Amino acid sequence: MSSAARAILGVAGAVLLLLPLGIGPYPLRVATVIFMWAALAGSWNLLAGYAGAVDLGPVVYHGIGAFVTAAGMVKAGLPFLVSAALGGAVAMAIAWAVGTPTLRLRGAYFAIGTLALAESAKQLALAWDRLTGIPLTGGSAGVSLPLSAGYLVFYYVMLGLMTAVTAAAFWLRSSRFGYGLRAVGENDRLAEASGVDIHRLKRRVYIGSALVIALTGGTAGYWLSYVNATEVFGASITFQMVVMTLLGGLGTPLGPVLGAAFLTLVSEFLGTRFVYHYLIAIGVIIVGVSLFAPAGLSGVLDLARRRRMRVPA
């Protein structure tokens, strides 16, 4: 990364840290939503964008984080941050147990396996109280959490999660670990034949991704003061993570951030003006970006930067 890019990112970080001092509740909420989706999409991008493993079940860890955080706060009376950290730890342990066998699957088999895992997790959460006799998920009724204290804590937690994921993506671009991971993404059989421990690399990223997704899920559950299995394990969450990453640029550090900001702002703008038809407009926009900018918004910005730097003959 060039010194100019570092300076720009530093200024952007400082602005985001001070932003709550100069905006009202609505812009603060929108910014928090952008950070939340950027953290989720960025976590998905670490595995799919760099290792080439398309995970269609990341929502498993979103739901685990939400329910463990809720249980910690409601059942054990733990503070939010302690409960969220516990949710992250549980998600990492489950990700290790699940990822060890499933990450040995390749291509469509891995995608289908993780999709089946997500649906199984949702059904288990819905039936948990009835099957085990342990009141945890509330079945279809869900679990209510204490009312939150305001937007500010969620703003900074989501900002921190987005920053952590983005920093990890930048690190993968230049580290030895990242080179190995990208080799796996380009040709995993060749990488394995060259001596790269492909399963260890993918498992580490999978576990790290699960941690951030679980922390985000737990934070979102407390923010909304309600956790329901159908929602926190919903396929629509995975869908938005994938779409935002592809819109912003798969395998790029800032792609998920750009995609999350773009789709959230467009949804907010159109949703207030075309209440009944805005989803159609969003679909048209997504198709248009996919057709005319297959590398995503980050690819468009990179192309514009190269053209600006081109010296005329």
Image (cartoon, rainbow, N blue to C red):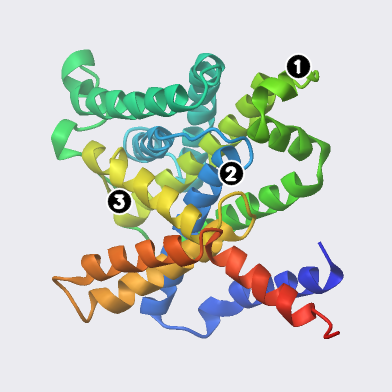
Query: Mark 2 and mark 1: span between their CA atoms?
Result: 22 Å
Question: Is 165 rendered above or below residue 18?
Answer: above
Taking the spot 76% from the left edge, 16% from the top edge, the residue there is 193
Please name the residue that numbered disc 3 is placed on: 146
Q: In the image, what residue type sits under mark 2? A: Gly
Circle 3 SS class? loop
Query: Mark 1 and mark 3: span between their CA atoms?
Result: 53 Å
Q: In the image, what residue type sits under mark 1? A: Ala
Query: Which quarter of the image is occupied by the C terminus?
Result: bottom right
Between disc 2 and disc 3, whose residue precedes? 2
Please name the residue that numbered disc 1 is placed on: 193
Circle 1 SS class? helix
The numbered disc on residue 49 is 2
Between disc 2 and disc 1, whose residue precedes? 2
Question: Is 236 rendered above or below residue 9?
Answer: above
Taking the spot 30% from the left edge, 67% from the top edge, the residue there is 284
Which of label 2 and label 3 is nearer to you? 2
Q: In the image, what residue type sits under mark 3? A: Pro
- How crowded pointer 2 is (Cα within 10 Å; few <14, some 14-19, many 20+) is rated as many
Report the front residue among 56 and 85: 56
Report the front residue among 125 and 222: 125
Q: Where residue 146 appears, x then y in whole percent?
A: 30, 51
